[in-house]
Image (cartoon, rainbow, N blue to C red):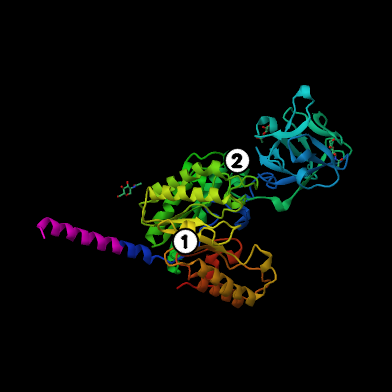
């Protein structure tokens, strides 16, 4: 063997053993025992409703659905055909066509979106200032002010963009030509507004747009600075947790000047999270929880009004957000994975796969070591991505296991819940687990269930059963969440109160 060749092979041997050692250290973090830092960089109002308390007219946020009944005619306003046509006042009952989703312009001004996804507007003066629902995008012409009665906030009058009030003159004639100010029930400009409280969405869009550009930046910055701090990472590491899944929204990639109403400043907070995680030996999963257009219509994907809009036309923007995050964090020792999208539900499977392919490539441009996590669509079988994901290197599939959100759990007792974990969940996990396929990640689960008045011991058993079964997931698991007003959703509370122990 020549001298050069000898040295070359020595270098190669060192290189290989170094790579091997590197692979060992990386893999020694798996399976993760992680927790979701939910409601931090992507707001979920149910986890801390008080965050919304300072918003004026806080029952009229983006996406809130309202129905409007003329007090004179005792008939509901209706977008004929669900949209694309006139608005009339001839319905005795209200359902889809009689329901308007609010887009908030400011605390008193709104656009009304109908079920065809079109917006209500006024026809021009020469066309009679009639109310129609045929506009594809809102502007000043689609902006109406809701004036609420001091004594009864659900008694309203509606000022149209021409400065005049709407009135239901007859069942088929709704126009904006009224200058008066009467609140009398017999006045055709007075409406009873029915706010569908079950439709109220409280997510990142609602909180930032609700507070508006003057107040939202400080509210959000204060929340980010106090909700999760370095002490929390210390607490996690002291209590046997070794990972965090951090939900982020697509707008973080445009920090510090994201499109309105989103607020800049969250990127620095994520940077800090990496620093703290690295200090306490905790691995970070960056999880794109809110994709542009909303991949599920839920508040936690920052939907404006509950409609799912994500699809092919949003793929390039979504990939751009992933590319940005991968580039920024690729070289951080704390990074273990980037999750391409949380809980798609109702999206086209082929679009999702094209996106996952492109998102994977974007991550791999910057790192070969970080895992790429693909979330299983909520409305599909848990195996739907298995063979697709098997074609990639270092990929995990994320499945979410809640004994909630389905009727089958509503009447289960304690033992039935535990058996469900030990049987169905365990068997689902093992059917997903293959020797050379993608790793499986139980990216969300919780101690919450439908058992009323469960004892502490029962809850402990339920937690224990889940930990045992989900520990079989090769990538690991992540509890939802770290903190929450509702105790059983807070792993911090559960640990401090002895419901569960990880070390
Ligand atoms: C309401 O008015 C519209 C427009 O004239 C008409 O097409 C529709 O049939 C009416 N509906 C009822 C329930 O009266
Ligand atoms: C809200 O917007 C409307 C319509 O653009 C405007 O007339 C009104 O002055 C605004 N109100 C506030 C409080 O900014
Ligand atoms: C990450 O590290 C690699 C190798 O050291 C380097 O080539 C690359 O530029 C770094 N990327 C960033 C975003 O700093």
Circle 2 sits in a helix, a strand or a loop, which is it? Answer: helix
Q: Position of residue 175 (x, y in %)?
A: 81, 31
Circle 1 sits in a helix, a strand or a loop, which is it? Answer: helix
Q: Main secondary structure of the magenta part?
A: helix
Residue 191 falls in image quadrant: top right
Q: Position of residue 294 (x, y in %)?
A: 58, 47
- The quadrant the N terminus occupies is bottom left
**The one of 496 and 201 positioned closer to us in this rendering:** 201
Q: Quadrant of ligand 1?
A: top right
Q: Which residue is mark 2?
A: 212
Residue projecting furthest to the top: 126
The reply to whether residue 480 is visible in this rendering is no
Which region is colored magenta? 1-21
Please tell me which residue is depicted at 76% across the width and 33% down the height of the picture: 132
- Eyeballing the image, is 261 above or below 411? above
Q: Horizontal placement of 192 versus 323: left or right?
A: right
């Amino acid at each position: 063997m020549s001298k050069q060749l000898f040295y070359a092979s020595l270098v190669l041997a060192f290189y290989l053993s170094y790579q091997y050692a590197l692979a060992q250290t990386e893999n020694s973090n798996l399976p993760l025992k992680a927790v979701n830092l939910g409601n931090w960089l992507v707001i979920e109002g149910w986890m801390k409703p008080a965050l919304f308390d300072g918003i004026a007219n806080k029952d009229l946020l983006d996406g809130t659905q309202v129905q409007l009944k003329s007090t004179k005619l005792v008939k509901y306003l209706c977008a004929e055909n669900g949209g694309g046509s006139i608005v009339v006042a001839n319905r005795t009952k209200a359902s889809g066509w009689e329901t308007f989703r609010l887009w908030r312009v400011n605390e008193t001004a709104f656009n009304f979106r109908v079920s065809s996804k079109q917006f209500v507007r006024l026809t021009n003066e020469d066309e009679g200032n009639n109310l129609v629902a045929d506009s594809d995008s809102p502007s000043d012409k689609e902006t109406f002010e809701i004036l609420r009665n001091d004594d009864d906030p659900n008694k309203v009058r509606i000022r149209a963009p021409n400065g005049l009030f709407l009135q239901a003159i007859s069942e088929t004639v709704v126009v904006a030509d009224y200058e008066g100010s009467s609140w009398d029930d017999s006045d055709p400009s007075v409406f009873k507004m029915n706010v569908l409280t079950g439709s109220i969405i409280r997510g990142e869009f609602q909180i930032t747009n609700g507070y508006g550009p003057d107040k939202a930046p400080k509210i959000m910055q204060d929340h980010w600075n106090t909700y999760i701090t370095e002490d929390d990472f210390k607490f996690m590491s002291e209590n046997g947790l070794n990972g965090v899944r951090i939900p982020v929204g697509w707008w973080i990639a445009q920090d510090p000047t994201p499109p309105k109403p989103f607020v800049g400043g969250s990127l620095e907070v994520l940077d800090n999270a990496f620093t703290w995680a690295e200090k306490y030996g905790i691995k970070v999963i960056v999880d794109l929880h809110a994709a542009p257009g909303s991949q599920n219509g839920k508040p936690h994907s920052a939907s404006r009004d509950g409609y799912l809009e994500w699809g092919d036309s949003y793929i390039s923007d979504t990939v751009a957000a992933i590319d940005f995050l991968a580039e920024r964090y690729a070289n951080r020792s704390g990074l273990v994975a980037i999750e391409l999208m949380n809980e798609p539900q109702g999206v086209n499977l082929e679009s999702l796969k094209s996106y996952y392919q492109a998102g994977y490539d974007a991550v791999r441009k910057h790192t070969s070591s970080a895992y790429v996590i693909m979330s299983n669509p909520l409305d599909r079988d848990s195996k739907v991505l298995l063979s697709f994901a098997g074609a990639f290197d270092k990929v995990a599939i994320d499945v979410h296991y809640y004994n909630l959100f389905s009727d089958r759990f509503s009447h289960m007792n304690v033992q039935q819940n535990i058996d469900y974990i030990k049987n169905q969940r365990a068997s689902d996990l093992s059917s997903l687990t293959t020797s050379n396929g993608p790793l499986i990640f139980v990216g969300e689960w919780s101690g919450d269930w439908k058992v009323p008045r469960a004892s502490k011991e029962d809850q402990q058993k339920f937690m224990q059963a889940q930990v045992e079964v989900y520990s079989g997931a090769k990538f690991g698991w992540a509890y939802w969440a770290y903190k929450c007003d509702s105790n059983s959703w807070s792993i911090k509370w559960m640990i401090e109160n002895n419901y569960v122990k990880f070390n």
